[in-house]
Amino acid sequence: MSLEKTEVDTISRLAAISVDASEVDQLTAKISNVLDLFQRMEAVDTTNVEPMSHPLDQVQRLREDVVTETDHHEEYQKLAPAAEKGMYLVPQVID
């Protein structure tokens, strides 16, 4: 799958990043290569492949789940500039 320069321009505008005109050709080729790799990966038949979370068949040693520290929530709430009902209040950053 190959991208057009206009698509790279659109992607860069939507991502709010500036792409220099001299870099558009190179970036278009790189993104197209990644998309081609994805297409080749999708073509692989994985019907009988069992999903795995790790390439090595190992068991992780886990420690016992025991509380080791006391709850300092109330102390931290008192230090916060603004807190209400157990939550920290912050200025709105998204309109």
Image (tube, rainbow, N blue to C red):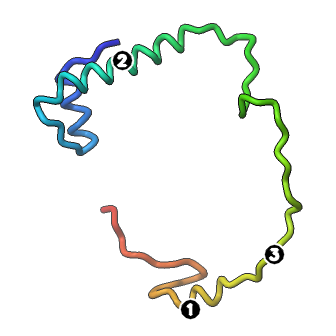
Q: Answer with left or right where residue 68 lies relative to residue 10.
A: right
> Which x, y percent locates residue 46?
67, 12
User: Cβ–Cβ below 8 Å for labels 1 and 3?
Assistant: no
Check disc 3 and report the residue beneath it. Answer: 68
Q: How many residues crowd around disc 2 within 10 Å: few (fewer than 14), some, or many (20 or more)? A: some
In the displayed structure, 80 sits above or below 15; it is below
Percent across and percent down for residue 1 are 35, 12
Q: Earlier in the sequence, mark 1 or mark 2?
A: 2
Nearer to us of marks 1 and 2 is 2
The first of marks 1 and 3 along the sequence is: 3
- Name the residue: 21% across, 31% down: 10
Question: Residue 52: horizontal and vertical position, in percent?
Answer: 73, 28
Work out which residue is located at the far right of the displayed protein and give it.
Answer: 64
Crowd around label 1: few <14 · some 14–19 · many ≥20 (10 Å): few
Q: Which residue is mark 2?
A: 33
Q: Tell me the tag on residue 92.
A: none
**Disc 1, SS:** helix
Which residue is at the front of the view, 49 or 56?
56
Judging depth in this view, the residue of 90 and 46 nearest the camera is 46
Specify which label sits upstream in the sequence, 3 or 2. 2
Residue 13 appears in which quarter of the rendering? top left
Q: Is residue 70 above or below residue 17?
A: below
Q: Could you tell whether 48 is left or right of 10 in the image?
A: right
Q: The disc labelled 2 sits on which kind of residue?
A: Asn
- For numbered disc 3, what is the local secondary structure? loop
Instruction: Please give left or right for residue 10 compared with residue 63 in the image.
Output: left
At x 17%, y 30%, the residue is 23
Quadrant location of residue 54?
top right
Look at label 3 and name its amino acid. Thr
Disc 1 marks which residue?
Answer: 78
Where is 80 relative to 20, above or below?
Answer: below
